[in-house]
Image: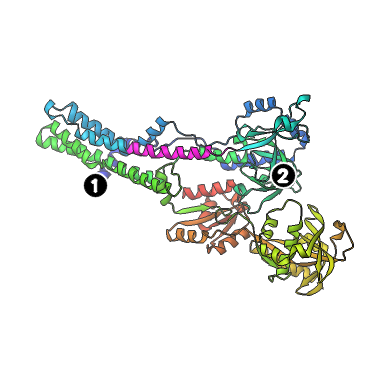
């Protein structure tokens, strides 16, 4: 019967062109808005092109473009630039005014329907009723359901939003910038007057909030600093920056003042640093070239905030039920009214009876029950230190059937560990670990993450008895042409002293300095055939997702006091140390739980495919197919839709690629 009435009503509405009045329109969707969103590929290409152009500019041209210099801007120039460019803040969802939030908490089909029914009840039970028959009961019950549902949702979400804002307010980030104002003779002592020493440029340092940075500012960078904006590197000393937030790379990237290799991907530029990344080690200075929404990170955030807030699956379900009831009521009430009026002849009584039918068909308690249930869930999650800003998000999270996850820092620990230490042919070797430990321990430069990973093996320090047996003689620092570094130690063994040069570096550069190799206690010439064997072994390690560093040694008499690059010759290759960002202990069980719940997981990472597949194997994640960023770039939307259905690992992705993949999945 219901199917017949629904079909009859739909066809009648269609013929009368009245169907638009009974569809779920955007005005009834909570928080729905319209927005014009730029095409992701066009925006990302524009940002990429601008970064490439500014990375290739000469410094003088860049200084001229930004009206700045190595000493930075003056205070007046910075204020004027702030007026032109605005605050250095990315677009984000603005907090709603309380009255807007209250309206959105109220506005849904059920509440609107109940409000209409409360109005009709007031009209029939109060306005049109005789003095002795007036009753506010129905109006009060229906109205209270609406009020309780709205206020409960409003209060819970308001409290959560305030908690989130309070957490944000606890973090105050600043950057150290140079100011080029002319100093008076009385202000010559920079440390005394400004609380900071004068910089080499003659400018003075000052701390400013990140939001006050402008293009042309020169910022000083050191370990632990956030990159406050998109910057061009001016100088760098062992400057390593973690770019996992943008690229997914598990290892930090070293930055230089000069771009050494050609690239068409701005995220691979060695002389640029990007907002959203952070300094792991080293120091340097950089000039701000883009702030706020003009940064690479800001454009990504802008595309997210520009989109309309689409109804969640939960809201869509509630709306569907609401509209079924509304349509059924709009069909049944007129039919009951007509039949009752024709058969009994009392049209007022028929109207009242039809309204009673309409009220009876509506579950008045449903909005309050739904809101109370979600609020209870939000309170339980708050005890687990989870802030729920939108109540509907709880059910929406539970309704997901595909989860897209990053690798670095999500599946993995986002830290480097020494995974293997092997001899030349891949067998485990404690001697190689000991040599690597001596090299990392005695070097005086800034220790990178690989050295830190080696030095975490404290048991090696105890077994070597460093204080009694070893003494540092000299050091040959790392440089980018050699791509290796050496330390020379004096080793006392059986009462006799000798010098040992211990060198570690990139494989090919180490092979050029080595003439022999050691296997066990035997030393062999490094022939071409053995070089191929070495490349095969290290290629196997690379296929396991490991970063390989070669280690070589050279024993010499204790007659020399100073050593140089020329001494890095005739080395004996002893083996390799290999590093990996290991998976979290919780990753495997979490993936298994998701699979048991019927949720498909897809890994989207900027890291290389070999490393990603290695991590997937270690957490028992079955890889069905792998696509790379270059392949995604070449696909049209139809091809991409097929690819995202078939594969579950996507590697070497840019943020724009990840966005496109997620859009394709949501469209299916």
Left or right, 496 with respect to 263, comes to right
Left or right, 314 with respect to 298, comes to left
How many neighbours does mark 1 have within 10 angstroms: few (below 14), some (14-19), or many (20 or more)?
A: few
Between 189 and 139, which is closer to the camera in this rendering? Answer: 189
Q: Alpha-carbon distance for marks 2 and 1?
A: 73 Å
Q: Residue at x 78, y 61 (%)?
A: 503
- Please, which colouring scheme is shown? rainbow
Residue 70 percent across, percent down from the top left: 76, 34
How many neighbours does mark 2 have within 10 angstroms: few (below 14), some (14-19), or many (20 or more)?
A: many
Residue 483 percent across, percent down from the top left: 78, 55
| Residue 151 shown in magenta | yes
Secondary structure of residue under mark 1 = helix
Between 335 and 302, which is closer to the camera in this rendering? Answer: 302
Residue 229 percent across, percent down from the top left: 64, 38
Q: Residue at x 53, y 57 (%)?
A: 648
- Is residue 584 in view? yes
Residue 610 percent across, percent down from the top left: 63, 60
- Write down the region rendered in magenta: 149-172
- Which of disc 1 and disc 2 is earlier in sequence? 1
Q: Residue at x 34, y 39 (%)?
A: 152
Tell me which corner region of the image, top left, top right, bottom left or bottom right, holds residue 50.
top right
The residue that label 1 is drawn on is 2
The residue that label 2 is drawn on is 283
**With respect to residue 486, does 384 lie above or below?**
above
């Amino acid at each position: 019967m219901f199917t017949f009435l629904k079909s009859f009503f739909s066809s009648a509405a269609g013929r009368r062109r009245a169907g638009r009045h009974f569809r779920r329109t955007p005005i009834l969707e909570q928080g729905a808005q319209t927005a014009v969103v730029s095409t992701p590929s066009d925006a990302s290409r524009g940002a990429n092109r601008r970064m490439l152009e500014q990375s290739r500019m000469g410094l003088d041209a860049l200084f001229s473009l930004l009206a700045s210099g190595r000493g930075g801007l003056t205070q007046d120039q910075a204020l004027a630039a702030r007026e032109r460019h605005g605050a250095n803040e990315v677009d984000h969802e603005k907090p709603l005014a309380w009255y807007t939030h209250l309206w959105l908490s109220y506005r849904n089909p059920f509440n609107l329907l109940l409000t209409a029914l409360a109005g009709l009840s007031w009209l029939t039970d109060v306005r049109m009723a005789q003095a002795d028959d007036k009753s506010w009961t129905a109006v009060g019950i229906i109205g209270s359901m609406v009020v309780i549902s709205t206020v409960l949702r409003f209060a819970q979400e308001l409290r959560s939003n305030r908690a989130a804002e309070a957490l944000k307010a606890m973090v105050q980030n600043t950057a150290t910038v140079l100011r080029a104002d002319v100093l008076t003779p009385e202000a010559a002592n920079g440390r005394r007057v400004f609380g900071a020493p004068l910089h080499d440029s003659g400018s003075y340092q000052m701390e400013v909030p990140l939001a006050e940075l402008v293009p042309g500012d020169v910022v000083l960078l050191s370990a632990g600093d956030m990159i406050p904006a998109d910057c061009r590197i001016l100088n760098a000393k062992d400057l390593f920056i973690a770019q996992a937030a943008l690229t997914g790379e598990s290892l930090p990237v070293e930055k230089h003042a000069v771009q050494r290799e050609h690239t068409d991907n701005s995220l691979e530029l060695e002389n640029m640093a990007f907002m959203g990344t952070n300094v792991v080690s080293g120091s340097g200075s950089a000039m701000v070239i883009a702030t706020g929404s003009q940064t690479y990170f800001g454009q990504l955030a802008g595309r997210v905030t520009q989109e309309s807030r689409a109804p969640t699956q939960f809201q869509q379900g509630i709306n569907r039920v609401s509209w079924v009831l509304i349509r059924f009521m709009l069909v049944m009430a007129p039919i009951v009214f007509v039949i009752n009026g024709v058969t009994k002849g009392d049209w007022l009584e028929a109207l009242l009876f039809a309204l009673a039918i309409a009220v009876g068909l509506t579950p008045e308690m449903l909005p309050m029950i739904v809101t109370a249930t979600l609020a209870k869930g939000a309170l339980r999650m708050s005890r687990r230190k989870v802030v729920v800003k939108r109540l509907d998000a709880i059910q929406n999270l539970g309704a997901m059937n595909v989860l897209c996850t990053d690798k670095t820092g999500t599946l993995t620990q986002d830290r480097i560990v020494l995974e293997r230490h092997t001899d030349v042919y891949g067998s485990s070797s404690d001697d190689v670990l000991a040599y690597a430990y001596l090299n990392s321990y005695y070097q005086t430069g800034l220790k990178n993450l690989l050295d830190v990973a080696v030095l975490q093996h404290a048991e090696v320090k105890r077994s070597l008895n460093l204080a009694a047996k070893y003494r540092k003689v000299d050091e040959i620092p790392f440089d980018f042409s050699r791509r290796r570094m050496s330390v020379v130690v004096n080793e006392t063994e059986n009462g006799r002293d000798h010098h040992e040069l211990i060198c570690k570096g990139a494989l090919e550069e180490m092979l050029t300095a080595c003439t022999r190799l050691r296997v066990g206690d035997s030393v062999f010439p490094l022939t071409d055939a053995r070089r191929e064997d070495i490349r095969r072994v290290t290629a196997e390690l690379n296929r396991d997702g490991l970063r390989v560093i070669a280690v070589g040694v050279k024993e010499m008499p204790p007659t020399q006091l100073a050593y140089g690059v020329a001494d890095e010759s005739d080395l004996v290759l002893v083996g390799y140390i290999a590093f990996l960002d290991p998976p979290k202990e919780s990753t495997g069980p979490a993936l298994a739980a998701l699979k048991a719940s019927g949720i498909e997981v897809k890994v989207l990472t900027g890291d290389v495919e070999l490393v990603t597949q290695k991590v997937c194997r270690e957490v028992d994640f079955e890889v069905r197919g792998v696509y790379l960023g270059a392949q995604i770039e070449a696909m049209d939307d139809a091809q991409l839709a097929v690819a995202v259905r078939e594969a579950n690992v996507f590697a070497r992705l840019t943020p724009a690629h990840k966005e496109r993949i997620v859009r394709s999945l949501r469209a299916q």
